[in-house]
Amino acid sequence: MTPQEELALLLRPAAGGLYLVSTGRAQQLEVQRRLYGARTDDEVRARFRASLDRIAGARAILLGVPSDVGAGFLRGSNLGPQAVRTALLEALPDFRERARGAGLVDIGDVFVVPQLLHDDMLSEGQKAASRRALYPDVPEPEASRLPVSPLSIAERALDLVFAINPEVAPIVIGGDHSTALPVARALARARGARRRPWGIVQPDAHTDLLEERLGIKYCFATWSYHANELVGRGGRLVQVGIRASQRPREHWEGRYGVRQFWAAECRADPEAALDAILAHVKGTGVEGVYFSNDIDGTDAAHADATGTPEPDGLSPDFVVTLIRRLGREVGLIGGDLMEVAPALAPTPEGAARTLALAARYLRETIEATLGRALA
């Protein structure tokens, strides 16, 4: 089985990662046709499959991970990838053509079984049952090696992408923030093989630094702990906009070796905070950073369509400037946008505002990663 053939099993056309049978299905198909410039579902599938053959020549790939299984008490970010892609199309109707010209290939969505999160949490019996459902035409022993949970599928898919193109940059749309962990794990292997040090810059209201949560190793509250271990600590994980924490900054920085810039200092003097962030990142000696952008790092007045909106956060202009400066002065090796949950906005206006901002953030991240405008 070639990497492209395996990716075709693991992934679905863009906006197709949610399993829908009736409710929402027509809207999903309409979005897919718009994304692929297709008139029929057969054309959608053909163009999706063709996108996998373009990974070798891509500068960056776009991947949706529509899973909110790793979230907290309010969920809905599983709708994020489809909604953000739609918002981006509304802002840039010719996004497909612009992306292709810039070297960005949309490789689709991880297919999500909404009751699963990571294969390590499943019994062998459950994995076997899920494989029969997901890969009915794949013979043993090939099927026994295929993952079934969204985080495990995402990690395997990105490993395959890097096997095809070691220099490609991943751009990911979540999903709750646990969906950033498979990106970090795949990046760690790809960059470690080439001995290229890297870091993570994470706008977020929360630290996500728990070693486990209620006995769960991988979820939205623990991903940063594991990612910090992958980058080697030493301040290579930089968290920006923290303001909802049960412990002070000294606890997190002292115990885990992260570097935090809390929202209050960023709001008090934005220019000085930006300078300090960039100086710190450069001082760690990394050759590039992955920009993991939780939408709740932004002030809730601008982005309330999320599971845990928090007041007194970062301004959109601050986040955009941070993206641009990291791209120019350090270099982005990829990025993501997490925790956008349109249905959780208190008002339709809030949902529209959040999605417009999400599209802006995604475009800025893509452009900073590629080092060129989507013109």
Image (spheres, rainbow, N blue to C red):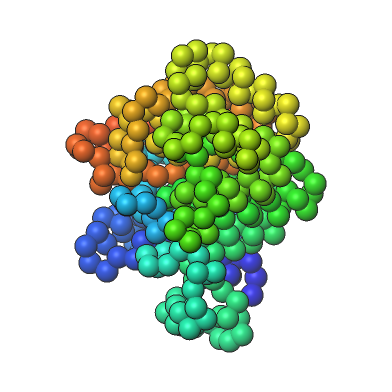
Is residue 153 at least partly visible in the picture?
Answer: no
The picture places residue 195, in percent across and down from the top left corner, at 80, 46
Q: Is residue 254 visible?
A: yes
Q: Quadrant of the N terminus?
A: bottom right
* Residue 335: quadrant of the picture: top right
How many numbered marks are there?
Answer: 0
Picture coordinates of residue 278, whole percent (x, y): 64, 23
**Which residue is depicted at the point 52% across and 48% down?**
210
Q: Position of residue 287 (x, y in %)?
A: 73, 35
Residue 176 on image: x %, y %: 42, 50
Relative to 313, is 337 above or below? below
Between 187 and 32, which is closer to the camera in this rendering? 187
Near-viewer residue (211 or 71): 211
Query: Farthest residue toward the bottom?
Result: 140
| Residue visible at 46% across and 14% down in the picture | 268
Q: Quadrant of residue 146?
A: bottom right
Q: Tell me: 285 left or right of 2.
A: right
Please name the residue shown 48% across and 83% down the image: 125
The image shows residue 102, relative to residue 25, as above or below, that is above
180 or 362: which is nearer to us?
180
Residue at x 64%, y 55% (from the top left corner): 186
Residue 249 as seen in the image, left or right of residue 15 = right
